[in-house]
Amino acid sequence: MSKAYEPRLAAKYRNEIKAVMQEKFSYTSPMQMPYIEKVVLNMGVGAAVGDSKKIKSAIADMQAIAGQKPVPTVAKKSIAGFKLRDGMTIGCKVTLRGDRMYEFLDRLVNVALPRVRDFRGLNGKSFDGNGNYAMGLKDQTVFPEIDYDQIDQIWGMDIVVATSAPNDEQAKALLAEFDFPFRN
């Protein structure tokens, strides 16, 4: 049974990528097939220590990018040198799964990454050994949801793509099938 609407990448995974991965790695069971479990976006806002309005701006930008309300991250301990107190909000994060995850990956690969200045491809070595890929963006303005005239400061963000692949080789093959632009 299929839904009335299915994201483009979800349909591509179901119709094309599974067959390619099956042929490439010769899985004996469909349960061995790796898939993308979740995408985690994290934005650290160190400037929020001095100005609490900046965290509100960062949360609004993250919500526009992800299409989902982010969770504020708080400091676990006080650090006097950074004027940081325990419990102070210093960033935000959001975890995307299902349709929102596929929609975000589609926008990331086809819209945001081509808009990055001097982009030469993603580093193929940024895997953690367990099939998860991490990357960073220097500014949030590469996403079309962000109006450049409305932002007060440029924030960077971390993007982690968690897969069910048992190793980095299979995870890289999976993400390459999703058209992630890895460098040679």
Image (cartoon, rainbow, N blue to C red):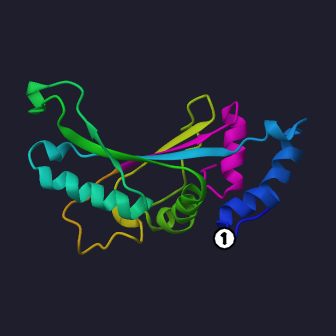
**Observer-nearest of 40 and 72:** 72
Asked whether residue 117 is in view, the answer is no
- In the rendered structure, does residue 183 fall within the stretch colored magenta? yes
Q: Is residue 73 above or below residue 156?
A: above
The residue under the point 24% across, 27% down is 76
**Quarter in which the N terminus is drawn:** bottom right
Q: Is residue 115 above or below residue 38?
A: below
* Residue 84 percent coordinates (x, y): 13, 32
The residue under the point 60% across, 53% down is 98
The residue under the point 39% across, 70% down is 145
Q: Is residue 126 left or right of residue 74?
A: right
Q: Is residue 76 left or right of residue 177?
A: left
Q: Which residues are magenta?
A: 157-184
**10 Å crowding of disc 1: few (<14), some (14-19), many (20+):** few
Rendered image quadrant of residue 178? bottom right
- In the rendered structure, does residue 70 fall within the stretch colored magenta? no
Q: Tag 1's secondary structure?
A: loop
* Residue 47 percent coordinates (x, y): 16, 46
Q: Is residue 32 left or right of residue 45?
A: right
Q: Which residue in the protein does label 1 denote?
A: 5
**Farthest residue, direction front:** 1
Q: What amino acid is at disc 1?
A: Tyr
Asked whether residue 146 is in view, the answer is yes
- How many numbered circles does the render carry? 1
Q: Is residue 108 above or below residue 27?
A: below
Q: Is residue 62 above or below residue 168?
A: below
**Observer-nearest of 77 and 5:** 5
* Residue 89 percent coordinates (x, y): 21, 41
Rendered image quadrant of residue 4? bottom right
Q: Is residue 92 left or right of residue 180?
A: left
* Residue 172 percent coordinates (x, y): 67, 43
